[in-house]
Amino acid sequence: MKLRFDNETGWLIGGVVALLAVASCIGWALSLRPGSPAHQNVIANLNARIKAWWTMAAVFLGALLTGGVGSVILFGLMSFFALREFITMTPTRPSDHRTLFWLFFIIVPIQYWLVGTGWYGLFSIFIPVYAFLFVPFRSAMAGDCEGFLERAAKIQWALMICVYCVSHAPALLMLSIPGYEGQNGKLLFYLILVVQLSDVFQYVWGKTLGRHKIAPHVSPNKTWEGFIGGCLSATAVGAALWWATPFTPWQSAGMSLAITLMGFSGGLVISAIKRDRGVKDYGSLIEGHGGMMDRIDSICFSAPIFFHLTRYFFTP
Amino acid sequence: MSELIAFLFRSLCGTRARWQGCAPGDQQRIYFANHTSHLDAIVLWATLPAALRARTRPVAAKDYWVATGLRRWMATSVFHALLIERRNVTRQENPLRDMLRALDRGDSLILFPEGTRASNLEPQAFKSGLFHLAKDRPKIEFIPVYLENLNRILPKGDFLPVPLMGSVTIGAPIRVEPGETKGSFLERARSTVWNLHIA
């Protein structure tokens, strides 16, 4: 899994830095304008997000530049912290304690070790076959039947979303695409960029034009206008980035569309899970530490689909 | 060293104190909390601001904290626990006397009035020591604290921790009201702690 740093990577990085710089300037200019307290709040929130994006971009670029290993470790940590939030907000019983220990300290490291070594065969089935059978077995060994099916399902879902799905992002580095050897870092960059841009565009379109809510009980901020505008804008940017990928412009547009649609579904599903768990209360429980789930919700769903589309169509 | 250990436990348990009913302050205080995990004393102590931490001593069971060298070192050198005898309480070896002595030296205390770790989340009945302390030392602030999720991080009867996120919620001080009986004060103290829970 050797990564090569080329001009195109440089352009991508430069583009992101320029984008963030422009966003910071706009945020700064907006913060100077007088407005109602509610308006000021929106601007402050926007500026906080821009700051967070700087940090995330720096961390992500750092990981990418250290070659494959840095990215695998970074996504492994993201899975670990997302799992921590997920299990914290999901009630389990004391008899699940040892199962959870396995989750954090054995299953997560093995999954990312498989990514790092590029063992695709086991990587793709380790969680859905081995871990999914082991989890209920270990809980049954603890001898507690109360809510058994529900407990097993919750833990399996935590693994599925936080670990299995997320691990497909760094797994892009293990694909060998003819004529694109050593350049997979750009593919990972492309995925993250399109996912994040789609989130931003959906937010911006939704705030400016949003009227018709899609699923107000699940996620009150998601509107059809935001969804369609966001997906199309991100798809357009994704298509325009074809030069950094193994795709043609049209293929790149198709891939970006798939990424944005999956990103949207991921965001919606994670919102539903959080509402089901009454996350308002848990949001305060994990004050100052939470947020990993919010960061990765759209990556969760788009990473495995993008991985498999690329693998099916572009590897021999 | 003490700062490092406090930091380690705060990160392991993902905790941060939520000062709901009062602010961190210099007053002499007794923090009393529910008890579900061996982590309770350390985590509550670790989430206090460093200046308060140095003067706040967890009251802990001697039999557990002197059992191994590491625990003894933690209890005596790191968080300066006030180790009390649970097993052979006599008129001379009385935990209450030790606590009063520590209070007279100006220390603040962390106390678990249930006496032992509970298996369920709602605190069990409080032991009467809290009432006697409150009655004897009316100037001291008695602060209720609810510790959440620590029992899931390190449950009773297990030694492997799972890195979930806990929380420390700190409420408003209570005192013995004029004419209040022991029973009703202890029950009120218990329900004040329980009412701080989030989930």
Image (cartoon, rainbow, N blue to C red):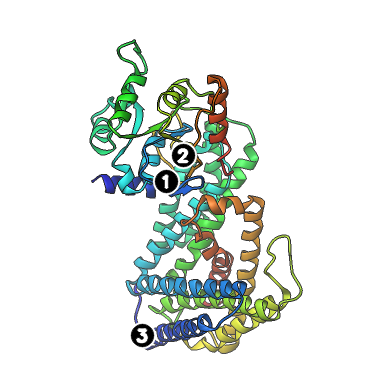
Neighbours of disc 3 within 10 Å: few (<14), some (14-19), many (20+)? few
Residue tagged by mark 2?
Answer: B150
Task: Name the amino acid type tagged 1.
Answer: Cys
Q: Residue furthest top?
A: B91
Residue tagged by mark 3?
Answer: A6
- On what subunit does the disc labeled 2 rest? B
Q: CA distance from mark 1 to mark 3?
A: 42 Å
Circle 3: element type: loop
Residue A104 image offset from top left, x and y in percent: 44, 48
- On what subunit does the disc labeled 3 rest? A
Disc 1 + disc 2, Cβ < 8 Å: yes
Q: Is residue B113 above or below residue A30?
A: above
Residue A200 image offset from top left, x and y in percent: 57, 76
Circle 1: element type: loop
Is residue A245 visible to us here? no
Q: Is residue B23 above or below residue A146?
A: below
Task: Name the amino acid type tagged 2.
Answer: Leu
Asked whether A243 or A49 is in front, the reply is: A49
Residue B131 image offset from top left, x and y in percent: 47, 23
